[in-house]
Image (cartoon, coloured by chain):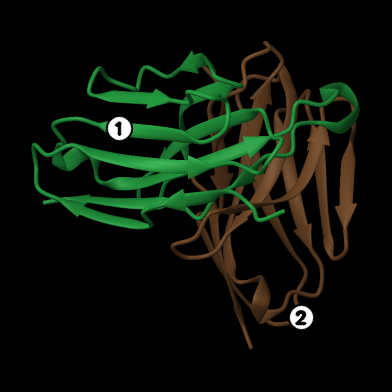
Chain colours: A brown, B green
């Protein structure tokens, strides 16, 4: 059974810092890995999706990397802003044909102005 | 594109009552998912529909839970004889069925339906 872990659980940084959020998974037979953002009391917004054959994806100030063999993904946020404050979740989709995503518990990010 | 819509957004119910949540996916998305999320945790998969067919069900979906998507459009999630442990946010999501190997599986979530069982 896939298990997804996110470290740290919470992070507080001053505005302008570059930061890295970590995601690890136990079963490397993934189809893809996604990063989501969740604002308090809201649904999830997909940020980046990395296929198992890819190493990284970029969108604006966000860069996500994937190392399938070691079971790790990182989300890099450049020049953080207060508006980046949210919970960031990673989720894996297994390469079994099943559609269920397995989520980590998230990293709660606070960017101080 | 109006996004995934869920109703009601908040529901407070007494233990033992039945509740029903509705989800309207993005039009033309034939895949629909239900997840449950408790405070401080990531969402947990409940069930998946492709068109009107329920193709996957989690073991979390006990016999008190039933989900339907009768015409392949909107879906309902009913919880019978609610228990305090059912208190959570119930998230609906949808995605299009396109060539996964080219376009991946970007999934779009609704704002969720909060359930509080007292």
Return the residue found at the far bottom: A113
Return the residue found at the far front: B71
Q: Where does residue B13 sit, x and y in percent of width and height? A: 15, 50
Q: Nearer the viewer, residue B18 or B43?
A: B18
Q: Secondary structure at mark 2?
A: loop
Question: Label for residue B22?
Answer: none
Q: Nearer the viewer, residue A77 or A35?
A: A35
Tell me whether circle 2 and circle 1 mark residues in contact (CB < 8 Å): no
Chain name for mark 1: B
Q: Where does residue A88 sit, x and y in percent of width and height? A: 60, 55
Q: Quadrant of residue B46?
A: top left
Q: Secondary structure at mark 1?
A: strand
Q: Where does residue A7 sit, x and y in percent of width and height? A: 57, 49
A112 lies left or right of A42:
right
Residue positioned 80% across, 32% down in the render: A67
Question: Label for residue A16?
Answer: 2
Chain name for mark 2: A
Residue positioned 36% across, 42% down in the render: B21
**How many marks are shown on the rendered structure?**
2
Residue positioned 60% across, 24% down in the render: A26
Label 1 sits on residue: B78
Q: Where does residue B44 sit, x and y in percent of width and height? A: 45, 34
For marks 2 and 1, give the CA distance: 46 Å
**Figure check: B106 above or below A58:** above
């Amino acid at each position: 059974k896939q298990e997804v872990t996110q470290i740290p659980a919470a992070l507080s940084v001053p505005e302008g810092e570059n930061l890295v959020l970590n995601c690890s998974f136990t079963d490397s037979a993934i189809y893809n890995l996604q990063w989501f953002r969740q604002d308090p009391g809201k649904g999830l917004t997909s940020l980046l999706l990395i296929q198992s054959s890819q190493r990284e994806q970029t969108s604006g100030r966000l860069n996500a990397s994937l190392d399938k063999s070691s079971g790790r993904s990182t989300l890099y946020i450049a020049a953080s802003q207060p508006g980046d404050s949210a919970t960031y979740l990673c989720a894996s989709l297994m390469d079994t044909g099943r559609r269920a995503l397995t989520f980590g518990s998230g990293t709660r990010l606070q960017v101080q102005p | 594109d109006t996004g995934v819509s869920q109703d009601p957004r908040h529901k407070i119910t007494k233990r033992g009552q039945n509740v029903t949540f509705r989800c309207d996916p993005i039009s033309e998305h034939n895949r629909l998912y239900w997840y449950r999320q408790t405070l401080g945790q990531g969402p947990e998969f409940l069930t998946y529909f492709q068109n009107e067919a329920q193709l996957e069900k989690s073991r979390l979906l006990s016999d008190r839970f039933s989900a339907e998507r009768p015409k392949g459009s909107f879906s309902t999630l009913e919880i019978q004889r609610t228990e305090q442990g059912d208190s959570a946010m119930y998230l609906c999501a949808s995605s299009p069925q396109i060539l996964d190997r080219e376009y991946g599986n970007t999934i779009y979530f609704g704002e969720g339906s909060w359930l509080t069982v007292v």
